[in-house]
Amino acid sequence: MKKLVFISLLLLSSAAISNPKMNVLPSLEWQKNELEMKVHDKLQRGTEVILGHEHFFVDVEIVTNTPETPNFSIPLNPSSEGDTGSIDGNGRKELDLTDDSKQAKAAEDDKTKSDAEIKFTNDVPETDYGESIVFSRLGMEAPLIDDFNDFSPSGKILLTMGDNSKDKINKMKEDFSKEKEKLVDQIKKLRDASKAKPSMIEQMWKYNTSIDIFKNISEINISVRLPNDIAKDERVRIEGLIKSIKLGVNDITPNFKFSYTINVPQKEDIISKSDFLKALSSVSNIIAIVLGVLLIGFVGNRLISKFFELNSAAQAGGNFTMQNDRPESDDDGGAGEMLAAGGGGGDGLGGVHSLNGIERFKVFADNTPQEAILLVKKWIAQDTKSGHAALRALVQQIDNSALTDIFKMLSEPEKAKWRELLNKPLNANELSLANDYISNQIVQSVILPSVIEDPNTYDLLLKLNAEMINQIYEKDPYIVSLVLNALSDSFVAEVLSSCESETVDQILMSSVIIKEQEVRDNQARIKEVLSQYVESKSKLPFVDKLYDILPNVSATVEKSIFNTLKQNINVEEFTELSQKNFPSELVSELPSKFLKEALANYDLGKKVSLLFAMEDSERLYYLDLFAPDGTKARDLMQIEFDSVERDEMRKSKIIAGKDDSWREFVKFVRTRITKEKDEKTEIENLVHNWAQDLYGSVETRPDLKVA
């Protein structure tokens, strides 16, 4: 039985030690946090029930004392009271018995007794004196005797070992009693010593008791913020209801603080489903009529589109017939004469007026190739929607051999500009309009032929501006008079407006006496003079590659590419290219509003890498734009920077990828520029002024028109 109790206690102790949840309570701070959460949840639910909505705020703070350190060396019960055992005469510990148990044991002992004088027992004597060894083995307590014939009248066997045998036995019993008392005293001392030291479970209990949250709570502060629209009389009732909520914190009374600072949003009128259906039914007839009209319109539009598609061939014809007051019999001769005025013979062009735009252009190019080339150059230089449509129509309808002859007479920039227009073909309707435009342009060229026949001279005229005319006039007034006779009226007016009054008089007097043939005869001289003032550059094959790789290079390479392009293309092309690929060196000069929004919307990780790799002054400039000092955004960026500083590997990686980070940000900025509307004009002016500064103050005019 004792072994079973001991084993049970040992198992329970081991289980308690091995289970940390049973072993030690959580720290006081964790207990405080858990209690705060439970109190908060209970208050949250209760307040929501009281108010009927969630427009309130509850904050719970539990203040605790510093827990006392328990004395683990003193047991809870140092006295011997409460001991459940005693020391028997043999020095063994016996369990205390109840009265019933003692009576049962006494009855059992009585049964074992017999009337015989010889006592039989199974217990071996603790002290063996050697005389009763045989009887002990037989289970009888009977010492040896000297005379087996000497029996006492009581029937007991008397032990006789000489004259002083009885004294010896008494002395031995006395010694044994003393020894027994010494041993009992030692056992008691050992028991007291073991009781003086607390057990591990007792120490654990002391520790858990010392950090119990309920024994260390100093005060509980609860702040409740309620809506400001609650009436004052109602506030007292609500506060009392909230205070009456049982929080389960023993006898501790919380300190409540109420404030009314929450703004409750106004509830919008919600239309019920039945009201919506009722309103919808009242206008159902109107809705049905509108839907019917839309359906009929959609079907009709499809039918009309299909009709035009089926008749696209007829529409593409686009026949252009000149209207005049002469009879039809004279039309052929009239057309022939007009074409002859453009340089061809009238006999070979009968019936040209009945041709559509593209057929008319083919005949026009065969008979007057120089005029046809000049017309194409004008369409390219005009940069108008109609001109672009005419160029697309030529590619779609003229065979390659005829196009090759035209391409041979164009410069590389002109070819490149034409190629850019071929990404979208014309449909049947657009093709018909383009053919009509081509016919009109050819007729105008026939009626008012250009006095400039050399395509190269024509290119130089297209690149003139008013400032160049004034510079040329200072050195060669005669050339200016010839040029003004070859240019359009609008450009002549612009030139005259930019000159002083005396100069205007001189230009007009010298220009009015110039004849058309005189202009034709001096084309070579005009070309020679204009070439000194107009920079004509051809695009080299590698220039096209520079266009393609420009968006994907670093800032250093980008700057070199722009410098190279400046030496090989004119300022108009350079400005246009810069508008499409915003220069990275101008990013810091972008409007503050645009740059602030771009940085605010840029990815946080990329933004940290970008700014961390910058110089201090540059980084501070960008930070002040989207995250001024003292704002949460600035604090967040500082935390990120500190994190990078602590991570040497990440820091090295960011510094090594400085150029890549900047290139990614420039791409992001360019994408936002294409979608920008508010600051678009300011950004375009920024690029334009930058390009003009690179090329100088000279501006070209790609939209000049030659008469």
Image: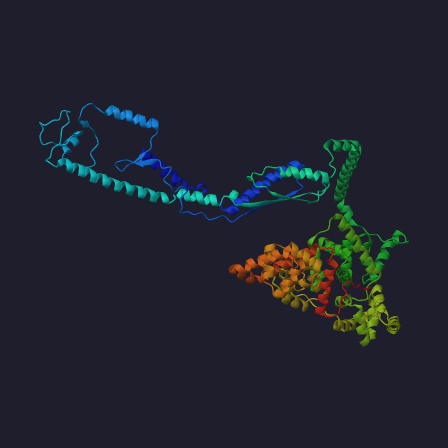
Q: Above or below — where is 396 with respect to 701? A: above
**Which residue is at a point 75% across and 71% down the rendered structure image?**
531
Assign the C terminus to one quadrant of the image: bottom right
Assign the N terminus to one quadrant of the image: top left
Residue 243 x/y as whole percent: 63, 39
Q: Tell whether 327 sits left or right of 68.
A: right
Residue 583 x/y as whole percent: 67, 63
Residue 524 x/y as whole percent: 77, 72
Q: Tell whether 651 sits left or right of 379.
A: left
Q: Nearer the viewer, residue 216 or 431?
A: 216
Query: Can you name the residue that lies furthest to the bottom here?
Result: 475
Colour scheme of the rendered structure: rainbow
Residue 517 x/y as whole percent: 84, 69
Q: Above or below — where is 319 with respect to 660? A: above
- Residue 339 visible (yes or no): no
Query: Can you name the residue that lies furthest to the right here?
Result: 325
Toward which corner of the image does residue 571 lie, by quadrant?
bottom right
Q: Nearer the viewer, residue 478 or 70?
A: 70
Q: Above or below — where is 157 with respect to 22? A: above
**Which residue is at a point 62% across and 40% down the rendered structure image?**
44
Q: Tell whether 603 sits left or right of 165.
A: right
Q: Nearer the viewer, residue 675 or 361?
A: 675
- Residue 445 visible (yes or no): yes
Q: Nearer the viewer, residue 61 or 297?
A: 61
Q: Give the number of marks.
A: 0
